[in-house]
Amino acid sequence: MNAARVGVVTFPGTLDDQDAARAVRLAGAEPVPLWHADHDLKGVDAVFLPGGFSYGDYLRCGAISRFSPLMDELIPAARAGLPVLGTCNGFQILCEAHLLPGALTRNGGLHYICRDQGIRVENADTAWTSDFEAGQEIVLPVKHGEGRYVADTETLAALERDGRVVFRYVGGNPNGSLNDIAGITNEAGNVVGLMPHPEHAVEELTGAPSVDGRGFFTSILKRLVNA
């Protein structure tokens, strides 16, 4: 088959889209630029919502981006099974769009956090995590001021019960997220959101302490090739 095509979305204020496209390309897939004002997904096989400060984080992080024309196409496509990954601001947008439950709020302590962070893979059965093993600990960069995951008691219980917590912080919780949650998935396992940045941990050249981020992109590539 031809190379799998992964759309990389750019909103006004997105700053990790080029890193995301490079990570997709290094895994052997074709990155396809998607602009927030587009009205179609260009036939992509998966979509990556990268980090940044879309619309300056006005109102709430991701609150304005959720209403972009492209999201009118992405939301029903994701609900129909299109694989979607959101990192940092992308995770915030997925929550604002109700593709994932809960919300991301100001970090505990109200400080911006930028550091390499240990996380544990809790669910290796999603479209984006099949190249990991449950219980595996990896290291990815975090860089955010509003990454504290919160949800009501019922939602948290359901996420834990159904195995939908995909990643959990280890070696210290950087932002006060409830239950040390770093990332979650929807019921179908095709939509994943997390605050850490796998696209910044894919090659030694950047000086990252690991290349653990590669697993996200090799996972989706295998999923698409074997679909």
Image (cartoon, grey):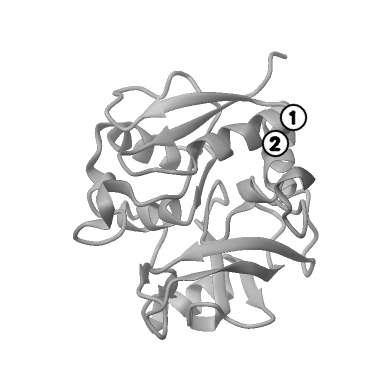
Q: Residues within 10 Å of mark 1 (few under 14, many from 20)?
A: few
Image: 103 above or below 31: below
Q: Which disc is residue 218 wearing?
A: none
Cα separation, mark 1 vs mark 2, equals 5 Å
- Residues 216 and 209: in front is 209
Q: Is residue 95 left or right of residue 82?
A: left
Question: Residue 78 at x, y = what percent?
Answer: 44, 40
Question: Residue 40 at x, y = what percent?
Answer: 35, 22
Q: Tell me what residue is drawn at x 36 percent, y 67 percent.
A: 103
- Residues 14 and 192: in front is 14
Q: Which disc is residue 226 wearing?
A: 1
Q: Tell me what residue is drawn at x 63 percent, y 49 percent.
A: 200
Q: Amino acid at mark 2?
A: Arg
Image: 43 above or below 9: above
Question: Residue 227 at x, y = what percent?
Answer: 68, 29
Q: Quadrant of the N terminus?
A: top right
The residue furthest top is 2
Question: Residue 43 at x, y = what percent?
Answer: 48, 19
Q: Amino acid at mark 1?
A: Asn
**Badge 1 vs badge 2, beta-carbon distance below 8 Å:** yes
Under tag 1, what secondary structure?
A: loop
Q: Is residue 227 something one can see in this rendering?
A: no
**Residue at the spot of label 2:** 223
Under tag 2, what secondary structure?
A: helix
- Residues 25 and 194: in front is 25
Q: Is residue 170 left or right of residue 12?
A: right
Q: Tell me what residue is drawn at x 52 percent, y 71 percent.
A: 159
